[in-house]
């Protein structure tokens, strides 16, 4: 029996064990794994999730039992201190000796701590292990007990630094990111994309300090600040160092292996070091003069080492390593692939930038415009997987490459995921191809997405490829004539429609109750808002009940703007407002120095409100008889009207009165996406009713009711549901239509897209809503009436609850304001200062 000793039980060390166990079932090898941490391998990529529940078990890649079941000896909390190459033995820090035939060094890396004066002070941490995080949590708790407004800095604005910034914020400390370079994520992003990312991060509460060289850490024993220059000091009471990594290569140095000039153990394409019996994998290995800090190359290295030890010597590490990556940093999509930075001599760049929505997309194409060479995505990386595949496989691109980031059609510029070649690498972490994913369905070994993931391991590491894996599975199932089950996310094995029915039947009333009853895990950014929307649609509960599961706009009951201020839009039903109410609005706008505009939905919008001022503004509005206009919610926004027969000589009916009635009936109605209505007094259509989710147009003999329209990026005319009906019938049909849409639509699906996907389209909807073909209209009407009667103004709730009001503070437990806001004049009003290029 040959003994393989693996030094290091991090993600790559574990992957070596997993691949070995999967490929070899005999008794000729014995594997011993040493980990210096007190627990089995865990997912360091998602380390920041530890702050959500402080459950180390949830991050485990495999329990200790897994190692036993696969015949692997796992020794934790014991470090290898020496390698004796001549005797082929290792010695541990506990002075125990073990013999090996093959040695695999998977010691990874450690946090690089710059040689800054004072770095040894109390309150200085690195962000690397669960123990580091536990130390940070304990120290932060002590700080907050003494000073509720305590501040912490993170040294480093790279990937880990930004994750650490989120961790600091989650601990209730005021977060500051300090970066030596003039931009965030300098290795992955260009200046413009970094600026967009910075604006987004600042809007959610992170303070960014760029081009800062820290001279020393101030304090007598414990940190009290960072000094950048003589008069440049940042007062902080805690510091998290995340300034990069250094390979843990000390064992290689002491035993005489060939080392890189700047560190790392030199390996060849077999992952062998200068000693053929010793392999190095992961962040300790120097391959082609590079240390690779991503999980995917480390997993590939693990696979190569396994094959070499088992005699499959043709398995070699490729010369070129793809460093493309997609991440979600503090809820913000960031991705880069291929060559993110493009010299003009090599190709052209196509750039799309929308700072108001914190979006940046850049693709680099060859000089002849035929090949995709790389790109950067910030804010929306939904196209990353397909763009990455186009780049990797040299697939043709549109004659106008801009279509790749600005799709001209509903389906975008990409074809089906099935158009990719079978050898296209879909999951780079686990090296899973399109052929393997589709083949698992075609050969009958797997029936659904969960089984494919379990069988192939695709998407089980970083999860970035999950959307494309899902598309491939669904498209393959469809091609075989099988039903595709559309689940909400990995935490709920149900579609939104199914989950809606379960929550309703079981009368579940909170996210945690729903998760415990029919979900798993802790939830995510996909399911939390979706479940909150379902609860609101069923019970008309406002976002104030469970604000932690809401999107930012719903959480703060206002739309966040590009400089971190908010807009306030009171409801003005039908656009009708008295002169006295206009005077009140004018006084409020003047008092709080707000930019004021009449919206496209015939309302008055205030911009530039600071978070601290929102409750005070709402209080004055409510006192004057106004209420929330829900301009921030996935709910009814407005019912626009013309003046109709009240004033217009062409008007056939009272469009204003009916618009007010409809808006007041459906106000606060939560739905899968926002809703807009319109009422026009004649076919001249001044209220643009056919561009709305529901529209009513007066004709001779009554009203024509239209549904399923919308404006936006893909405008769609509403379709005729019923002709020449009276007010009561319009409301009856609208009640049924809206509840049926709410019950059956997917998350974030507008009524236009929903109606397009409804089997049978408008004719089927007529049968359901008008003819009651499903025998459900009585229930639909009852549900709507319940929601109408359950309505409460969430602004009023917020100002009457002291605990809720605490949410509207820029700083935790402090009334201090954001002193970074800068406005400039705009005609007779103001606007946020323009961004600098």
Image (spheres, grey):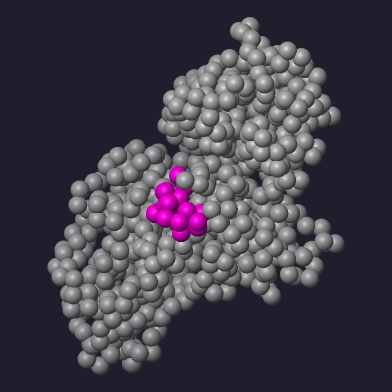
Whether residue 455 appears in this view of the structure is yes
Q: Quadrant of residue 305?
A: top right
Magenta stretch: includes residue 749:
no
Q: Name above or below for residue 86 compared with residue 376.
A: above
Q: Residue at x 23, y 46 (%)?
A: 508
Asked if 665 appears above or below 114 in the picture, the reply is below
- Quadrant location, the C terminus: bottom right
The magenta region covers 437-454
Splitting the image into 4 quarters, where does residue 522 fall?
top left
Front-lying residue, 692 or 420? 420
484 in relation to 257, above or below: below
Does residue 274 appear left or right of residue 455 in this picture? Answer: right
Instruction: Tell me the residue at 48%/71% (across/down).
Output: 712
Depth order, front residue of 554/366: 366
Assign the magenta stretch its main secondary structure.
Answer: helix
The residue drawn where x is 54% and y is 63% is 417
Closest to the observer: 770 or 470?
A: 470
Q: Looking at the image, can residue 124 be seen?
A: no
Residue 351 at x, y = what percent? 69, 63
In this rendering, position of residue 633 left or right of residue 397: left
Relative side of 14 to 750, left or right:
right
Q: Which percent across, then down, holds residue 778?
A: 14, 68
């Amino acid at each position: 029996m040959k003994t393989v000793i693996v030094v290091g039980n991090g993600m790559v060390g574990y992957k070596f064990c997993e691949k070995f166990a999967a490929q070899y079932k005999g008794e000729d090898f014995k594997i011993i794994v040493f980990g210096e941490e007190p627990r089995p391998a865990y997912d360091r990529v998602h380390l920041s999730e530890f702050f959500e529940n402080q459950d180390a078990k949830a991050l485990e890649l495999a329990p200790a039992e897994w190692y036993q079941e696969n015949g692997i000896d796992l020794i934790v909390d014991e470090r290898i201190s020496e390698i004796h190459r001549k005797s082929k033995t290792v010695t541990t820090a506990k002075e125990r000796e073990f013999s090996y035939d093959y040695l695999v060094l998977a010691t990874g890396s450690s946090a690089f701590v710059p040689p800054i004066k004072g770095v040894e002070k109390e309150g200085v941490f690195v962000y690397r292990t669960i123990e580091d995080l536990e130390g940070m949590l304990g120290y932060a708790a002590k700080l907050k007990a003494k000073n509720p407004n305590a501040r912490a800095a993170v040294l480093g604005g790279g990937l880990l630094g930004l994750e650490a910034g989120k961790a600091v914020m989650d601990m209730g400390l005021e977060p500051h990111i300090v970066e030596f370079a003039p931009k965030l994520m300098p290795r992955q992003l260009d200046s413009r994309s970094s600026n967009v990312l910075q604006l987004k991060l600042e809007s959610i509460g992170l303070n960014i300090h760029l081009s800062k060289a820290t001279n020393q850490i101030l304090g007598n024993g414990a940190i009290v600040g960072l000094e950048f220059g003589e008069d440049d000091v940042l007062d902080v009471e805690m510091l998290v160092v995340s300034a990069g990594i250094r390979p843990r290569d000390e064992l290689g140095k002491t035993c005489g292996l060939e080392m890189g000039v700047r560190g790392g153990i030199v390996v060849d394409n077999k992952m062998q070091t200068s000693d053929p019996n010793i392999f190095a994998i992961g962040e300790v290995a120097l391959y082609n003069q590079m240390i690779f800090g991503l999980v995917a190359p480390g997993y590939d290295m693990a696979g190569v080492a396994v094959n070499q030890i088992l005699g499959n010597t043709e398995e070699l590490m490729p010369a070129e390593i793809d460093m493309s990556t997609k991440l979600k940093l503090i809820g913000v999509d960031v991705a880069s692939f291929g060559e993110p930075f493009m010299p003009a001599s090599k190709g052209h760049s196509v750039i799309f930038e929308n700072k108001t929505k914190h979006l940046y997309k850049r693709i680099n194409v060859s000089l002849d415009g035929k090949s995709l060479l790389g790109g950067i995505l910030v804010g929306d990386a939904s196209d990353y997987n397909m763009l990455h595949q186009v780049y990797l496989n040299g697939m043709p691109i549109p004659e106008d490459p801009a279509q790749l980031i600005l799709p001209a059609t509903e389906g975008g510029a990409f074809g089906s995921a099935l158009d990719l070649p079978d050898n296209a690498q879909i999951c780079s972490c686990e090296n899973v191809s399109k052929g393997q994913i589709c083949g698992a369905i075609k050969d009958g070994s797997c029936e659904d997405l969960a089984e494919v993931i379990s069988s192939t391991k695709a998407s089980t590491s970083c999860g970035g490829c999950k959307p494309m894996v899902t598309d491939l599975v669904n498209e393959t199932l469809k091609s075989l004539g099988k039903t595709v089950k559309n689940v909400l996310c990995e935490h709920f094995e149900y579609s939104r429609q199914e989950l809606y029915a379960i929550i309703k039947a079981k009368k579940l009333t909170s996210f945690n109750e729903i998760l415990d009853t029919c979900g798993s895990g802790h939830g995510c950014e996909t399911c939390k808002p979706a479940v909150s929307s379902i609860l609101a649609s069923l019970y008309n509960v406002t976002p104030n009940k469970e604000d932690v599961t809401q999107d930012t706009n719903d959480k703060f009951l206002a739309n966040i703007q590009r400089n971190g201020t908010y807009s306030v839009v009171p409801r003005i039903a039908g656009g009708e407002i008295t002169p006295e109410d206009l005077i009140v609005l004018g006084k409020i706008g003047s008092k709080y120095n707000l930019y004021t505009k009449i919206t496209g939905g015939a309302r008055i919008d205030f911009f530039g409100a600071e978070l601290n001022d929102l409750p005070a503004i709402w209080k004055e509005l409510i006192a004057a008889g106004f209420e929330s206009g829900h301009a921030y919610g996935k709910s009814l926004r407005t019912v626009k009207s013309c003046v109709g027969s009240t004033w217009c000589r062409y008007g056939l009916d009272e469009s204003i009165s009916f618009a007010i009635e409809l808006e007041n009936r459906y106000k606060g109605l939560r739905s899968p996406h926002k809703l807009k209505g319109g009422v026009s007094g004649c076919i001249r259509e001044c209220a643009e009713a056919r561009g709305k989710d529901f529209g009513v147009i007066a004709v001779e003999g009554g009203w024509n009711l239209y549904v399923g329209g919308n404006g936006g990026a893909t405008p769609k005319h509403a379709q005729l549901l019923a002709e020449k009906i009276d007010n009561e019938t319009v409301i009856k049909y609208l009640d049924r239509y809206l509840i049926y849409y709410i019950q059956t639509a997917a998350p974030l699906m507008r009524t236009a897209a929903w109606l397009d996907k409804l089997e049978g389209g408008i004719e089927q909807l007529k049968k359901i809503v008008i003819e009651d073909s499903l025998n459900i209209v009585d229930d639909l009407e009852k549900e709507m009436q319940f929601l109408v009667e359950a309505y409460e103004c969430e602004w009023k709730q917020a100002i009457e609850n002291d605990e809720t009001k605490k949410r509207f503070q820029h700083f935790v437990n402090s009334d201090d304001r954001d002193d970074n806001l800068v406005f400039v004049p705009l005609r007779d009003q103001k606007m946020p200062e323009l961004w600098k290029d």
